[in-house]
Image (cartoon, grey):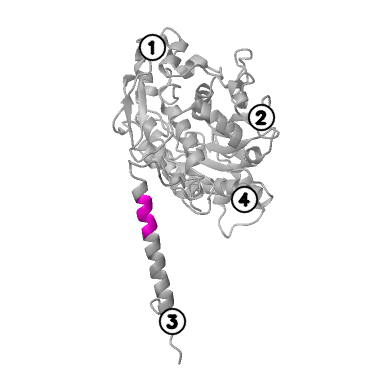
């Protein structure tokens, strides 16, 4: 019977050849080492470009979030007299968007001007595990033109993000609509940021074929509170109510009369409406990244079918029911979004398309009594809105997207910097955020890093 070959059953000639080859390789390494010392100009070639597709993460969302706020003033101004002073203190030149300009900058209430320049004098420093390019609006504009822009979907907090981006990318961009000329605002109006025809970057950028400076947006904001429209969510809700053995016209009639919602106003869209925008082609569409955030409107006052008065304030009047439904709905959302991207690729779509879910940021109690960043997140003393349960919604979404079923949808747990900034809210409330203190600018900084460095470097 023939004996099987083992790992060490080398033929003598083969073994000696391998020993010689190993010796030659070691000698070569020693030569490289000798001539790559500080006394020599010889060095190893930079192989990083060869292995770009295998690059490991240089700053994960968790590493970004586990940092601290450092006092780092950008100007010698000691007080403000107008909105431009606030911009200067934030290191910004101006803003392309003009809706509620003073409100976004925190200069609409003169009694709150005393918090300047302090509120705009801090810089977020992530953990030392992060290797990240400094925030640079000019480079972001170039990336958006050449690699694809951002489609922002969310509530009024995401509108804060849109306004901040219009300042970060200024003066290379313009924004629409013009609310100075037409102040009759509707929250359903789409808002866009375009490359400015007067930007000096036009002489430096090779515009993609079909790209229109006039009509191709770099950033678009749609008011989408829930990521689905009401009809979508009602349909999902009704499906969850049907027992396995239920059938017949009486059941159908009862379900047809069931609705999840109260008469509280909300704005939203269906994935069937916005996914074609993400996946569309030039000149109308040129998005590479869909940026979404939701949780603030998942309440028992809007979704009154889940309200439970017996649960009381401590139980959020039935917020556990809303969280359970959120888990079901967001799974359906992720499945629909991933399926659309899969279909795009199956039909020959080749441009990079990805979705990032930004962790939702709740408000702070008594925010205007705080005048500097916290070093640790402080617990809630009351049960305002659904704020104390926002971390639960974030964890549900994060756990869902950890599944390999959704390779193009990423959850970014980058809410901690904002949770440490009770001082960074708008002058009139404790939920919305100012442009300038660095919270929203940090979102843009990390998302830009993530889509340009982390996603291309992932091993698949």
Q: Are marks 3 and 2 in contact (CB under 8 Å)?
A: no
Secondary structure under the numbered disc 1 in the rendered image: helix
Q: CA distance from mark 4 to mark 3?
A: 46 Å
Examine the rendered structure and indicate whether residue 372 appears above or below residue 357. Answer: above
User: Does the segment drawn in magenta span residue 133?
Assistant: no
Quadrant containing the N terminus is bottom left
Query: Gap between marks 4 and 1, in whole Å?
Result: 50 Å
What residue is shown with label 4?
Answer: 342
Q: Which mark is residue 113?
A: 1
Q: Find residue 315 and report its horizontal and vertical position in percent.
A: 37, 40
Label 2 close to label 4 by CB (< 8 Å)? no
* Residue at (37% x, 10% y) in the render: 77
Which residue has dot 2 on it? Answer: 216
Q: CA distance from mark 3 to mark 1?
A: 82 Å
Among numbered discs 2 and 4, the one appearing first in the sequence: 2
Sequence order check, earlier mark of 1 and 2: 1
Q: Magenta segment range?
A: 27-33
- Using the image as rendered, state which of residue 415 and residue 5 is in the foreground: 5
Of badges 4 and 3, nearer the viewer stands: 3
Mark closer to the observer (4, 1): 4
- Name the front one of labels 3 and 1: 3
Residue where numbered disc 3 is placed: 5
Horizontally, residue 114 falls left or right of residue 325, namely left
Q: Secondary structure at mark 4?
A: helix
Tell me the residue at 36%/20% (across/down). Answer: 121
- Say which residue appears at 44% left-offset and 24% top-offset: 433
| Label 3 Cα neighbours within 10 Å, binned few <14 / some 14-19 / many ≥20 | few
């Amino acid at each position: 019977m023939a004996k099987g070959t083992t790992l060490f059953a080398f033929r003598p000639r083969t073994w000696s050849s391998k020993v010689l080859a190993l010796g030659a390789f070691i000698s070569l390494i020693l030569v490289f080492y000798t001539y790559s010392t500080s006394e020599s100009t010889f060095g190893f070639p930079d192989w990083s470009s060869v292995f770009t597709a295998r690059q490991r993460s240089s700053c994960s969302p968790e590493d970004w979030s586990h940092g601290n706020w450092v006092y780092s003033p950008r100007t010698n101004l000691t007080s403000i007299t107008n909105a431009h002073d606030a911009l200067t203190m934030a290191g910004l030149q101006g803003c392309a968007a003009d809706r509620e300009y003073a409100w976004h900058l925190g200069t609409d209430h003169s009694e709150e001007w005393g918090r300047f320049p302090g509120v705009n004098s801090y810089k977020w420093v992530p953990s030392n595990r992060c290797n990240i390019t400094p925030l640079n609006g000019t480079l972001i504009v170039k990336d958006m033109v050449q690699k694809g822009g951002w489609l922002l979907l969310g509530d009024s907090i995401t509108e804060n993000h849109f306004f901040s981006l219009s300042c970060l990318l200024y003066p290379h961009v313009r924004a629409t609509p013009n609310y100075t000329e037409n102040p009759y605002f509707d929250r359903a109006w789409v808002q866009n940021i375009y490359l400015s025809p007067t930007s000096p970057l036009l002489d430096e950028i090779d515009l993609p074929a079909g790209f229109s400076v006039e009509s191709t947006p770099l950033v678009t904001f749609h008011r989408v509170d829930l990521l689905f429209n009401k009809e979508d969510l009602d349909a999902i809700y009704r499906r969850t109510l049907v027992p396995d053995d239920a059938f017949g016209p009486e059941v159908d009639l009862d379900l047809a009369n069931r609705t999840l919602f109260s008469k509280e106003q909300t704005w939203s869209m269906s994935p069937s409406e916005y996914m074609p925008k993400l996946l569309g082609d030039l000149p109308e569409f040129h998005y590479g990244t869909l940026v979404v955030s939701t949780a603030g409107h998942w309440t028992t006052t809007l979704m009154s079918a889940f309200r439970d008065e017996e649960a009381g304030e401590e139980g959020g009047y039935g917020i556990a029911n809303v969280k359970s439904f959120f888990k079901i709905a967001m799974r359906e959302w992720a499945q629909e979004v991933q399926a659309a991207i899969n279909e795009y690729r199956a039909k020959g779509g080749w441009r990079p398309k990805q979705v990032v879910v930004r962790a939702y940021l709740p408000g702070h109690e008594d925010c205007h009594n705080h005048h500097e960043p916290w070093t640790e997140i402080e617990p809630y003393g009351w049960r305002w809105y659904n704020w104390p349960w926002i971390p639960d919604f974030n964890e549900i979404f994060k756990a869902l997207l950890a599944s390999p079923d959704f390779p193009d949808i990423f959850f970014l747990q980058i809410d901690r910097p904002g949770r440490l900034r009770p001082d960074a809210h708008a002058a009139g409330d404790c939920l919305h955020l100012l442009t300038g203190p660095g919270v929203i600018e940090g979102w843009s900084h990390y998302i830009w890093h993530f889509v340009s460095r982390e996603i291309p470097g992932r091993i698949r």
